Image (cartoon, grey):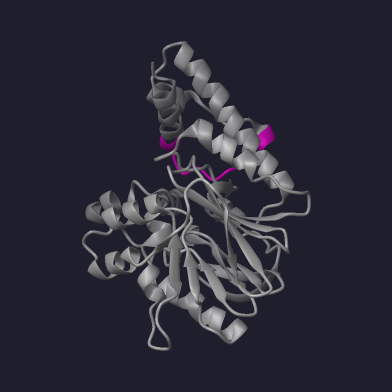
Amino acid sequence: MAHLSRRRFVADAASCAGHLALAAAATPGGLRKLWARTATGRTVAREPFGALERVGEGTWAMISTPLGGDRTTVCNGGIVAGRDAVLVIEGFFQPQGARWVAEQAHQLTGRWPTHLALTHWHADHANGITGYGREEGGAPALRATEATRDQSIEANRANAATVAALREAELLPPGVPSVLDLGGRVVRAVPLDGHTTSDLALEVEDQSVLFGGDLIWNGMFPNYVNATPSRLSVSVRALRREATTLYVPGHGGLARQSDLNRYLDLLDEVERAARNAHRRGASAAEAGAQFTLPATLGEWVLFSPAFFERAFGAWYRELAP
């Protein structure tokens, strides 16, 4: 992987992009293979930065594989097509990633994306939105929560084109689900919180496919940088659906209910350990340094115990008197 400059590190470190960039730099090759596990869906396109997997009729999941060092996309996302419209999910980290997804949507459906939804404001999910702009008919209509729009604008102040695109966003109603009718296919947008103050899950209702954004991680320890951990746990549980549901996490491979249950067990284990450490007066740094994940949770990619400290720090903010 290319060397990360200090300037780039500082710019990315607060987001999931920084989390994954550092993991890519230090994760052993064996663990990187866990990230690029065998596809659950049928792979229709592949690049060094990820693969597009068909997960239903007119529905594809973009599964990013950034631990190899290519940060074109970083986060997962997707394409959902109906009779009248095509939705793309996430702006990805770089415009080239968004452009590639748009081109794949056009090849697969015969149409360019008409709508774009962002699950939250972190750089790896929102910074590449200008890649969807094109001469063949303009950019897709952007949908996001107000907090996602505002925080993305703040994070992109130096990029006038990105800010201009964000200012055009159609804001989703706060606190209540809304629907996007693509023509014979409805996508339900569910506003939640926990990973950030404004998270969005997107559910393809007729296929039991749910795009969870960074409320859901699979196979990699989650980034708690802006988390409210108690709310995160509540929101993840609110996303639990029927046993056949396929979950597209913000990072990691496609997930089934057993994977979601394992992730919830991980969140519960972090909470238990954080509460115990807080009661005995250990600092977040001390607690993070002492913490290990139980073997029963299986293997989770973690490049440094510093991210345990970040998780404990998030819990300590909630537990403070």
**Which quadrant of the figure contains the C terminus?**
top left
Q: Quadrant of residue 248?
A: bottom right
User: Can residue 91 be seen?
Assistant: no
The residue that appears at 54% across and 67% down in the rendered structure is 50
Residue 105, visible in the rendered structure: yes
Whole-percent x, y for residue 160 in the image: 23, 68
Range of the magenta residues? Answer: 296-307
Residue 284 left/right relative to 47: left
Furthest-right residue in this view: 243
Q: Is residue 298 magenta?
A: yes
Q: Nearer the viewer, residue 190 or 44?
A: 190
The x and y percentages for residue 54 are: 67, 71
Q: Is residue 222 above or below residue 244?
A: above
Residue depicted at 48% across the width and 48% down the height: 199
Which residue is at a point 65% across and 70% down the rendered structure image?
Answer: 59
Magenta span: chief secondary structure:
loop
Q: Residue furthest top?
A: 280
Q: Is residue 136 above or below residue 88?
A: below
Image mark count:
0
Q: Position of residue 105 (x, y in %)?
A: 55, 79
Q: Give me the residue at 60% from left, 30% from top.
A: 268
Q: Nearer the viewer, residue 212 or 63?
A: 212
Q: Position of residue 219 (x, y in %)?
A: 60, 47
